[in-house]
Amino acid sequence: MAWQVVIAGGGFGGFYAARALERLLPAQSAHVTLVNDANFMLYTPLLPGAAGATLDPRHVVVPLRSQLRRTDLVIGRVTGAEPLARTLQVRRIDGQQLELGYDQLVIALGSVSRTLPVPGLAEHAIGLKSLSDATAVRNQLLGCLDVAESVEDPALRSEYLSFVFVGAGYAGVEGLAELQDFAAQVVELYPRCAAQGMRWVLAEARPRIMQEVPASLSEFAERELRRRGVEVRTDTTLHELSARTATLSDGETIPARTVVWTAGVKPSPVVARLGLPLNDEGRVLVERTMRVAGSPARVWAIGDCAAVPDAARPGHACPPTAQHAIRQGRLVARNVAAALSGGAARPFRYRTKGVVAELGRNQAVALTLGVRWRGLPAWLIARTYHLLLMPGIGRRLRLLADWNVALVFGRDASAPGQLGSPTPLEHD
Ligand SMILES: Cc1cc2nc3c(=O)[nH]c(=O)nc-3n(C[C@H](O)[C@H](O)[C@H](O)COP(=O)(O)OP(=O)(O)OC[C@H]3O[C@@H](n4cnc5c(N)ncnc54)[C@H](O)[C@@H]3O)c2cc1C
């Protein structure tokens, strides 16, 4: 009988694990099943590009079926697990409840936005973590410009023309930079808004933005944002939000209708319902081989939801990045294959080789093998990197086409807010 290998989560970690398992395990001896809540893998580093309209939202995802030919896909939500019975509980998208039995289980359920108890945050802020977030942010920007253009009162108009980002990791910085760049282009279509001007604020709790890159690169990114008129507020947190205002810890209340929350991530909540040991942050405790601590060699956890010991920083878990999740996915596949054939598991030893962060306007910062890049060369490195990493030639060509069309013809200023919501058959 064939071994059953189940992977929970089809993001960076789960997708690369499935792809490697297809190569490592003979079809007749093992059966791989991947459970994900969407039939695509979201390429998150390109989300800011989708929000900023340089990329079509559909082009920042990878359809799982076209890339994983030997893996069974179950599209639905993991809802729980029974480690002793070796089953994973899944609610398929049609509502059907399934119990998937496994010999080997890989947990790769990623993360969600980390919120704090800030009054009004859950009601009034938007995240930038999913495809619908990116589309919503873009629609929100265009909606605000559309309203502001027809408002008579300049004070009310400025509420619609003020945009606050909270959290200046790469998601916040890239998101704000791309969106502001987009807004600067399309505002020409809105004469009143162009005459009044927009306000962009980036608040960060720590003393500098983009902790992921060396100080010299984060200073470059900050200078670049300030040059464009962005107010960068370090050592500043969000105190309170309402539908029309954002109050910061420095005491200023900014009249603003748009607040984007990009202040970190926490493990997907379902991870706490799987009967596995967790650390203080709610990440699954694993050994260096990514085997779940204290479990027999059959349950593994990787990516943002797992606290994989970081070889580069003893005593710490790996940071929640795609580059770690990809490598963990590939290695966990080898370890699963080894476990099935009686071989030994290898420890995860990866050290970050570089980071790239696009800032819009053909600007970026990058660190590659210790070499620091900024400006246009960094931007070319960033785009080449994503082009090479995007799985499938068809997906790469779509990216190239989108980028070049946007460079030559500018970005698309339509707000497709109705996408995915059918018009009721009977309505007024
Ligand atoms: C805007 C943004 C920009 C980023 N830029 C970079 C970057 O430039 N470089 C970098 O290295 N990292 C970047 N990251 C971080 C990177 O996206 C994550 O570290 C990476 O995606 C982690 O991979 P993962 O497999 O652990 O999780 P994910 O890729 O999030 O995959 C988890 C999968 O599990 C699915 N899932 C969750 N819950 C369930 C459930 N209950 N049932 C079924 N499926 C479920 C999710 O939908 C998802 O498909 C960025 C993140 C964001 C949000």
Image (spheres, rainbow, N blue to C red):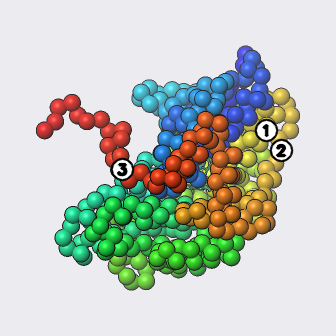
Q: How many labels, in total?
A: 3
Q: Residue at 42%, 27% (x, y): give it.
A: 94
**In this rendering, position of residue 171 left or right of residue 426:** right
Task: Spot the residue most to the right.
Answer: 343
x%, y% of residue 356?
66, 60
Q: How crowded is mark 2: few (under 14 residues within 10 Å), some or many (20 or more)?
A: some
Q: Which of marks 2 and 3 is nearer the N terminus?
A: 2
Give the alpha-carbon distance from disc 2 to disc 1, as whole Å: 7 Å
The residue that label 3 is drawn on is: 414
Residue 427 visible here: yes
Q: Quadrant of the C terminus?
A: top left
x%, y% of residue 28?
75, 17
- Against 67, residue 220 (above or below) is below
Give the alpha-carbon distance from disc 1 to disc 3, as whole Å: 47 Å
Q: Earlier in the sequence, mark 1 or mark 3?
A: 1
Contact (Cβ within 8 Å) of mark 2 with mark 1? yes
Q: Is mark 1 on a helix, strand or loop?
A: helix
The residue that label 1 is drawn on is: 335
Residue type marked 3: Ser
x%, y% of residue 142?
34, 57
Give whichever of 131, 306 is nearer the camera.
131
Residue 116 visible here: no
Q: Which mark, by number, is residue 346?
A: 2
- Against 152, residue 270 (above or below) is above
Res 420 → quadrant:
top left
